[in-house]
Amino acid sequence: MAAGGRRRGALEQEVLGCLAASGRPLTVAEVLAELGDGLAYTTVMTALSRLHAKGALTREPAGRAFAYSLPADPAAMGASVTARRMSRLLDSGEDRAGVLARFVADLNPEDERLLTELLTEGRRPGGEERS
Amino acid sequence: MAAGGRRRGALEQEVLGCLAASGRPLTVAEVLAELGDGLAYTTVMTALSRLHAKGALTREPAGRAFAYSLPADPAAMGASVTARRMSRLLDSGEDRAGVLARFVADLNPEDERLLTELLTEGRRPGGEERS
DNA sequence: CAGGACCTACTACCACGGGTTGTAGTGAAA
DNA sequence: TTTCACTACAACCCGTGGTAGTAGGTCCTG
């Protein structure tokens, strides 16, 4: 980060603000134009891509670009980010089944009920891209 | 950490080594005696307690002390640590159900099958203390 | 058709700060 | 005296986030 660059998280917050103000999916180029800070295209692209990778944004193809948007339910962003982090932890280990077994063992009965429902009735949160 | 203290992770490794060499659960005092480094009781106690808190060790009451031991299957330590980290992530959020729903949505069919089994047949890894 | 614009994935470097770990004291209880 | 939970401080370092270039591919225009 060169002198004069943003504080940690500041760019991401600006990007999120753009998307919230827009109310429709935006491509990297559109966000870049909105920010108007002389940033490199790839800086904004990386920010959007990272936000998507950590579950904070959804994206859909728009021509040969991607258009990024906030989750349908913005309040769900936190849940999505946390879930993705959990998934990454699960992926980082070697004994996947062992991890899952222990994770489940620590759940409370309410959680178990919910999971059972989700797994048996195939309910899924909708509208999010599967990577 | 005062000058001459251990590198990060070294104390934990020594403690784990004690437990592995012993082959039976050890109390803080016993580990302290084994290490024999002039450490404060509470230093060793904190190390053991933290290892337990992150899922690396199990413990059982031994009088008014706790006796710590490696998991029954030492290979399972990694899985236990990862599972605990996942649990802590889940606990850190606000929308528990939303997190779980999204986490499950990202699982592969094999994982789902396993989870379904665990949840419906009540299988649990045995011998570990529930906190 | 060639060149430029646009886009992505990949890569890389740097700053930073939050989480982890070593160390240990205190207070209360047994 | 021993033990635990709680608390606290300092050092460290890994993951995160800002920044941006490169390579390869697609599309559009002159």
Image: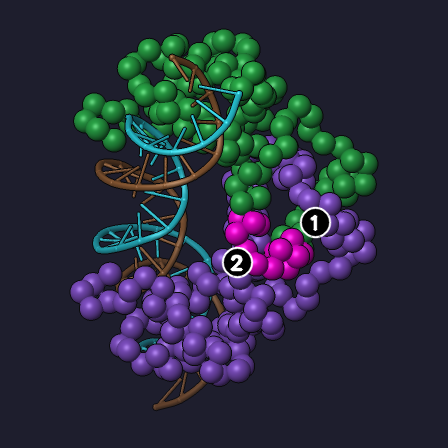
Chain colours: A purple, B green, C cyan, D brown
Q: Which residues are magenta?
A: B89-101
Count of numbered labels shown in the rendering: 2
**Which quadrant is the N terminus of chain A positioned in?**
bottom left
| Magenta span contains residue B111 | no
Does residue A85 appear left or right of residue A73 in this picture? left
Q: Chain of mark 1?
A: A
The residue positioned 39% from the left and 10% from the top of the image is B34
Which of the pair B104/A106 is nearer the observer?
Answer: A106
Does residue C13 appear left or right of residue D3 in this picture? left
Specify the quadrant of the image occupied by residue A80. bottom right
Name the secondary structure under disc 2. helix
Which numbered marker is on residue A22? Answer: none
Q: Which label's residue is closer to the chain start, 1 or 2?
A: 2
Which numbered marker is on residue A111? Answer: 1
Specify the quadrant of the image occupied by residue A59. bottom right
Specify the quadrant of the image occupied by residue B16. top left
Disc 1 marks a residue whose amino acid type is Asp
| Magenta span contains residue B99 | yes
Disc 2 marks a residue whose amino acid type is Val
**Which quadrant is the C terminus of chain A positioned in?**
bottom right
Which is the main secondary structure of the residues drawn in magenta? helix
Q: Is residue B57 visible?
A: yes
Distance between mark 1 and mark 2 Cα atoms: 19 Å
Question: From the viewer's perspective, is the residue at label 1 or at label 2 nearer?
Answer: 1
Q: Position of residue A39 (x, y in %)?
A: 29, 73
Q: Chain of mark 2?
A: A
Which of the pair A13/A31 is nearer the observer?
Answer: A13
- Please say if C24 is above or below A54: above
